[in-house]
Image (cartoon, rainbow, N blue to C red):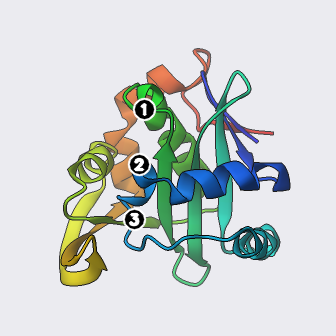
């Protein structure tokens, strides 16, 4: 479990699967994904079995005071290159418009950089998802490139913006945020229990 000032990130458990599948397939969330496939209960169970045994994928539920607010992950880890991909989504909308997603991202990135000793985190977003691109830029991610007409989404071939964050850039970009999201007696990376 990863603890911040207002949130915890805990590993996804079997009891979370119905909520995860509902969110993942809801129009509000899925409209931002590169694929909009419907997920059956059997497929969700198979996904859970795979990631719960994986040493390359870490999925967390974001909670505040026991309320399930979102999901985030560090996935597709390359232990040779020390790279991975990051993903995050928040529901309900009022929480997504608060500072809580930043706190969740910092907890997750602290885990990736300081516990897993990764050096680079990558992300990808539909070019139409300016909110995600801006959010990640605020954490220090830089846009590395655009994959032109890369995915078929909502009836059109759409671009994907590739982003990346190196550990040294993350530390600089999040220095001020850390005072808000970490316990007041520490500026160290978020604690892990």
Residue 129 lies, in percent from the top left, at 25, 55
- In the image, 167 versus 134, the foreground residue is 134
Mark toward the start of the polypeptide (1 vs 2): 2
What is the CA distance from the residue labelled 1 to the residue labelled 2?
9 Å
Circle 3 crowding by C-alpha within 10 Å: few under 14, some 14–19, many from 20 = some
**Label of residue 28 in the image:** 2
Q: Quadrant of residue 115?
A: bottom right
Which residue carries the number 3 mark? 33
Element marked by disc 1:
helix
Going by the image, does 54 lie left or right of 150?
right
Q: Is residue 176 above or below residue 54?
A: above
- In the image, 190 versus 135, the foreground residue is 135
- In the image, 80 versus 103, the foreground residue is 103
What is the CA distance from the residue labelled 3 to the residue labelled 1?
17 Å
- For the residues carrying marks 3 and 2, which lies nearer the camera in this image? 2
Mark toward the start of the polypeptide (3 vs 2): 2
| Cβ–Cβ under 8 Å for marks 1 and 2 | yes
| Cβ–Cβ under 8 Å for marks 3 and 2 | no
Going by the image, does 44 lie left or right of 151?
right
Q: Quadrant of the N terminus?
A: top right
Going by the image, does 71 lie left or right of 41?
left
Q: Quadrant of the C terminus?
A: top right
Which residue carries the number 1 mark? 93
User: Residue sitting at 43 percent across and 36 percent down?
Assistant: 102
Q: Is residue 90 above or below residue 97?
A: below
| Cβ–Cβ under 8 Å for marks 3 and 1 | no
On the question of residue 98 being in view, the answer is yes
Residue 112 lies, in percent from the top left, at 58, 57
Circle 2 crowding by C-alpha within 10 Å: few under 14, some 14–19, many from 20 = few
């Amino acid at each position: 479990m990863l603890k911040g000032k207002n949130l915890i990130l805990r590993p996804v458990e079997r009891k979370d699967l119905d909520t995860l599948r509902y969110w993942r397939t809801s129009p509000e969330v899925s409209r931002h994904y590169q694929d909009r496939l419907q997920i059956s209960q059997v497929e969700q169970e198979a996904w859970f079995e795979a990631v719960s045994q994986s040493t390359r994928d870490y999925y967390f539920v974001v909670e505040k005071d026991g309320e399930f607010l979102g999901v985030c992950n560090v996935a597709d880890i390359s232990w040779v290159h020390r790279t991975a991909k990051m993903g995050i989504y928040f529901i309900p909308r009022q929480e997504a418009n608060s500072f809580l997603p930043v706190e969740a991202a910092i907890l997750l990135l602290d885990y990736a950089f300081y516990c897993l000793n990764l050096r680079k985190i990558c992300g990808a977003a539909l070019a139409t998802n300016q909110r995600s691109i801006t959010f990640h830029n605020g954490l220090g991610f830089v846009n590395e490139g655009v994959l032109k007409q890369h995915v078929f989404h909502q009836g059109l071939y759409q671009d994907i913006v590739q982003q990346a964050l190196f550990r040294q850039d993350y530390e600089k970009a999040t220095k001020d945020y850390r005072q808000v999201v970490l316990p007041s007696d520490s500026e160290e990376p978020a604690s892990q229990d």
